[in-house]
Amino acid sequence: MPNIIVNTELCNRCNTCASICLMHIIKPAQEESYPSIDSRNENNCLLCGHCEAFCPQQALVLDYLTEEKQLYQEEESIIAPHHLALYMQKRRSIRYFKPESVAKETITGILEIARYAPTGGNSQTVQWLVIHDPKEVRRISGLTVEWMRSIKDTPHPLANYVPNIIKDWENGLDPICRNAPHLVFAHIPTGDFIDDRTDAIIAITHFDIAAPAFGVGACWAGFIQMAIDSYEPLMAALDLPPKRSVGFGLFFGYPELETKAIPRRNPLEVVWRT
């Protein structure tokens, strides 16, 4: 496991790194020493990088993927609140798409942002499946419709809703993925916390928010998610690595229509406790 590399010419022994360490494994600097991690505690490091990120002098680096270290000027990272508000408020669930594909390089750019989404204990266990072939997307839609046929005339909460969806599919429409050219799924390890999809949902939300900056629109694939949870043929079609489970997915592509206004939402309701 990594340790910290301290630039003794820059370090002023302020011990910000030691105080910010979530696991309290960084030994504070003394008059004759610099911050360090005892070798016995290296395995307790979460690789969160807080020690490096919050160092005022940028005097240390976590010895982990050091080639990916990024420095930035503060003004480069600041978004004015009203610009951020407008960007997020105009975000829409897209259901009408252009037929053209989104380049893999563009999708990778979105995923590079989404991989910085927070995870519990900085586990970084979220991985991705991108279905880039529109024909394969169509096949996933078809399997979802097959699942809907299986719940028709049953006590399932969607039973009365699926006949119209099935009819649309039989008429050549795609009511599942709305003719989107691509699908993306965030998947997580199968284990004791299989029912906790929090990390995957946070990651897929980052994808959803970042996508419009690339000119890409997305919509949450709720029907597919419900089918995955109970329809083995669909799960088999996704062919995830062993001991992995879908957290959630989006269908996405280039929007056919442009938004021109922001619709209303219910007024903010907050309970303040002071």
Image (cartoon, rainbow, N blue to C red):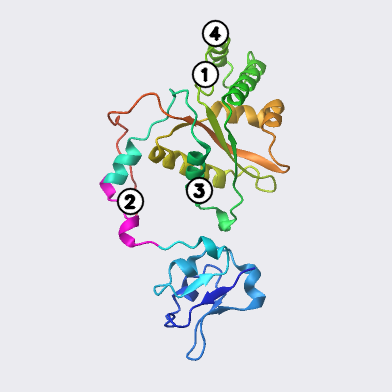
| 46 up-or-down from 5: above or below | above
Question: Which of label 3 and label 4 is nearer to you?
Answer: 3
Q: Which residue is mark 4?
A: 171
Secondary structure beneath label 1:
loop
| Quadrant in the picture for residue 209 | top left
Type of amino acid at the residue the image marks with label 1: Pro
Give me the residue at 67% from left, 17% from top: 150
**Front-most of residues 90 and 268:** 90
| 245 up-or-down from 147: above or below | below
Question: Which of label 3 and label 2 is nearer to you?
Answer: 3
Question: Which of label 2 and label 1 is nearer to you?
Answer: 1
Q: Can residue 128 be found in the magenta stretch? A: no
Q: Is residue 52 left or right of residue 240?
A: left
Give me the residue at 40% from left, 75% from top: 57
Q: Classify mark 3: residues with Cα within 10 Å, few (<14), some (14-19) or many (20+).
A: few
| Quadrant in the picture for residue 73 | bottom left
Type of amino acid at the residue the image marks with label 3: Glu
